[in-house]
Image (cartoon, helix red, strand yellow):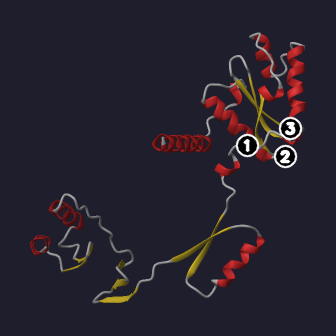
Amino acid sequence: MERLSKKHKTINYFRYVDDILIIFDPNHSDIQSILADFNTVQPNLQFTAEMEENKTINYLDITIHRTHSNWNVAIYRKQKCATFTYIGKETTYIPNLFRRTDINVAFRTNNTNYNGLSPTHHTTDKYEYTQSGVYKLTCPDCNKTYVGQTGRSFPARYKENKRAFRHNSHTLKFAQHMNEYAHSFGTIHDTMQILQYHKKSTHLNTIERYYIHSEFAANNHLNDSQNIFLNPIFEDILNTHLLTYLLHGAESFLRS
């Protein structure tokens, strides 16, 4: 270090483990040249440089402020933060407990994009078909799928498609596909899969678009392609599902 100090004409040098403080005059020393020399001493150790801001820099647990003729030193305290899951209006009383402390309070929610668009886990009882939400119709002969939503019961939408199929109507995409390719129309249990329960709302539209995007990405959809647009949020969620699937597969493989 003495050699580097002489070469770069630094004023002083302090070190604690891998934290280094260098005092230098920018008129005589170049910090980038100093950093480059440091990183050639040991290839396995690579340093980065943090410069002072507004004549102030934090080093270990002290704050150093540079004046015209001296340095002022004060205790440096890292900002503390406490995070709580938001569960309702009761949660808003929590900041009052920390008002006279130096702890910042942040909130998070379980109502994330991932959770909001995750598949519904349900049983196969009769009650499931009396609700509304997003569904998927699958052709039993070629496995092509149509994703849709309904604010009524699922059987009502299934019957509409079957009626269109019987009358050779082209008003519904799924029934049109079955007629054009002379494919068979299965029972509601064989044909319809409930993807997610939800009442009629704007959020239901988002859920429907997500599942349409999912089938579109798999090149397995019967929905109108002109109404499908790339969505980076949907892509991230699909990639998360894929990663989870691969990780679970790897765990199963290792256990076997």
Q: Secondary structure at mark 1?
A: helix
- Going from the N terminus, do you reach mark 2 or mark 1 first? 2
CA gap, disc 2 and disc 1: 12 Å
Residue identifier under label 3: 129
Choose mark 2 or mark 1, whichever is in front: 2
On residue 206, the disc is 1
Q: Secondary structure at mark 3?
A: helix
Quarter placement of the N terminus: bottom left
Choose mark 1 or mark 3, whichever is in front: 3
CA gap, disc 3 and disc 2: 13 Å
On residue 188, the disc is none
- Which of these two is toward me, 16 or 62? 16
Q: How far across and how far down the image is residue 174, in percent?
A: 78, 22
Residue identifier under label 2: 199
Q: Is residue 146 left or right of residue 2?
A: right
In the displayed structure, would residue 220 be above or below residue 128?
A: above
**Label 3: few (<14), some (14–19) or many (≥20) C-alpha neighbours in 10 Å:** some
- Which of these two is toward me, 16 or 250? 250
- Going from the N terminus, do you reach mark 1 or mark 3 first? 3
Q: How far across and how far down the image is residue 227, in percent?
A: 71, 30
CA gap, disc 1 and disc 3: 21 Å
Three-letter code for the amino acid on which mark 2 is drawn: Lys
The residue lying at 78 percent from left, 42 percent from top is 123
Q: Is residue 104 left or right of residue 54?
A: right
Choose mark 3 or mark 2, whichever is in front: 3
Q: How far across and how far down the image is residue 209, in percent?
A: 71, 37
Q: Is residue 59 left or right of residue 238?
A: left
